[in-house]
Image: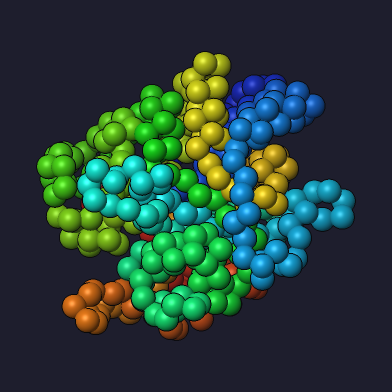
């Protein structure tokens, strides 16, 4: 999962495609950085994949009047906050289990710094006890059920006192397609553990995940010592491993696999109507995985109310994160609240 040092030793004409694909997912992170050759050809190619991305009116009215992320020069500017939402039961796909309504199973805030050279992905535990405008206080994942992406954005904005500039929604169906498109992903597990839902056993050491196993891996929380916190770290670990695989020579050098990947990613995303996918892809072309950090919203513990278990966000941690996001000072924040180690999974 480390950056491939050989990339810097290749001729410039062969380096460019790797740069266009440094960021393969700002969707569970992650927006796709789409590939190409020379600048003109690449921009046209990006446009082809960009047209496959679904766009909806996902931003609340308060966010629509926020400062633009595209400068008068036409270039994308930072800092920028992107809310990435992984949804479960999209289109009531689990109705056969008696599950109805789309739920936000994963909520991640991605902060891009002013120069668009670093990214910080902060996971918000789905059981976080927060205030949802118009609905009182409950778990953060209820916001999407009550009012879709706009209400979830309002909830995050109110809690952190920030502006969410854009939103990306991706379903677990996309996880299958993207993982299979790159030929599967390898993750390292610290100790053998059985998934309580499917009874699949992940063995200590390297595990190769296809699309189906990837979903089991990132959704497991039972039998993990840290429960949902370990699941969050698994999700972050998987995203980093997936991005590394997607930018590997085996994918970039295979035009059919590359096309499968880009088609799978772009056809699986839904973004807000103002999201500058193509321009952001070019703006992020120099970013490496070494400049992406993963962390979790600081928590102060759990509490049971009305027979329901909630995770309670740390108010001092929220204040620190809020200040760091507004001041574009995440490195200072991370010195006090170190990022997660996502090299290994529980």
Lateral position of residue 18 relative to residue 207, left or right: right
Which percent across, then down, holds residue 96? 24, 43
Lateral position of residue 265 relative to residue 211, left or right: right
Q: Is residue 230 visible?
A: yes
Q: Residue furthest right?
A: 73
Task: Classify residue 157 by image quadrant.
Answer: bottom right
Instruction: Tell me the colour scheme of the image.
Output: rainbow
Quadrant of image for the N terminus:
top left
Residue ID at (55%, 16%): 255
Which percent across, then down, holds residue 238? 37, 43
Lateral position of residue 343 relative to residue 119, left or right: left
Residue ID at (75%, 23%): 41
Residue ID at (37%, 55%): 101
Which percent across, then down, holds residue 151? 52, 67
Position of residue 252 relative to residue 32, above or below, is above
Position of residue 255 relative to residue 179, above or below, is above
Task: Classify residue 106 by image quadrant.
Answer: bottom left
> Which of 221 and 249 lies nearest the eye of the viewer?
221
> Which of 132 and 163 lies nearest the eye of the viewer?
132
Which percent across, then down, holds residue 61? 66, 67
> Which of 221 and 286 lies nearest the eye of the viewer?
221
Lateral position of residue 270 relative to residue 66, left or right: left
């Amino acid at each position: 999962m480390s950056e491939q040092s050989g990339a810097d030793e290749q001729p410039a004409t062969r380096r460019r495609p790797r740069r266009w694909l440094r960021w393969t997912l700002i969707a569970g992170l992650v927006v796709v950085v789409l590939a190409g050759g020379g600048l003109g050809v690449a921009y046209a190619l990006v446009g082809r994949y960009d047209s496959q991305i679904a766009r909806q009116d996902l931003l609340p009215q308060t966010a629509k009047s926020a400062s633009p992320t595209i400068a008068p020069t036409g270039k994308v500017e930072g800092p920028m906050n992107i809310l990435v939402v992984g949804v479960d039961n999209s289109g009531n796909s689990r109705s056969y289990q008696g599950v109805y309504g789309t739920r936000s199973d994963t909520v991640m805030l991605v902060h891009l710094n002013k120069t668009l050279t670093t990214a910080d992905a902060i996971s918000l535990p789905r059981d976080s006890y927060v205030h949802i405008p118009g609905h009182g206080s409950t778990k953060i994942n209820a916001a999407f059920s009550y009012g879709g992406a706009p209400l979830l954005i309002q909830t995050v904005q109110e809690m952190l006192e920030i502006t969410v500039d854009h939103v990306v929604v991706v379903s677990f169906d996309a996880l299958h397609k993207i993982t299979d498109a790159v030929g599967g992903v390898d993750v390292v597990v610290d100790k053998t553990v059985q998934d309580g839902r499917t009874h699949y056993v992940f063995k200590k050491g390297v595990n190769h995940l296809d699309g189906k196993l990837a979903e089991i891996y990132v959704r497991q929380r039972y039998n993990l010592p840290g429960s949902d916190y370990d699941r969050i770290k698994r999700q972050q670990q998987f995203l980093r491993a997936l991005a590394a695989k997607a930018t590997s020579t085996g994918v970039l050098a295979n035009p059919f696999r590359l096309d499968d990947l880009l088609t799978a990613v772009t056809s699986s995303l839904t973004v807000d109507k103002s999201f500058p996918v193509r321009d952001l892809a070019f703006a992020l072309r120099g970013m490496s995985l070494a400049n992406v950090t993963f962390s979790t919203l600081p928590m102060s513990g759990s509490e049971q109310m009305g027979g329901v278990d909630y995770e309670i966000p740390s108010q001092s941690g929220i204040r620190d994160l809020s200040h760091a996001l507004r001041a574009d000072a995440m490195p200072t924040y991370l010195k006090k609240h170190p990022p997660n180690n996502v090299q290994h999974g529980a």
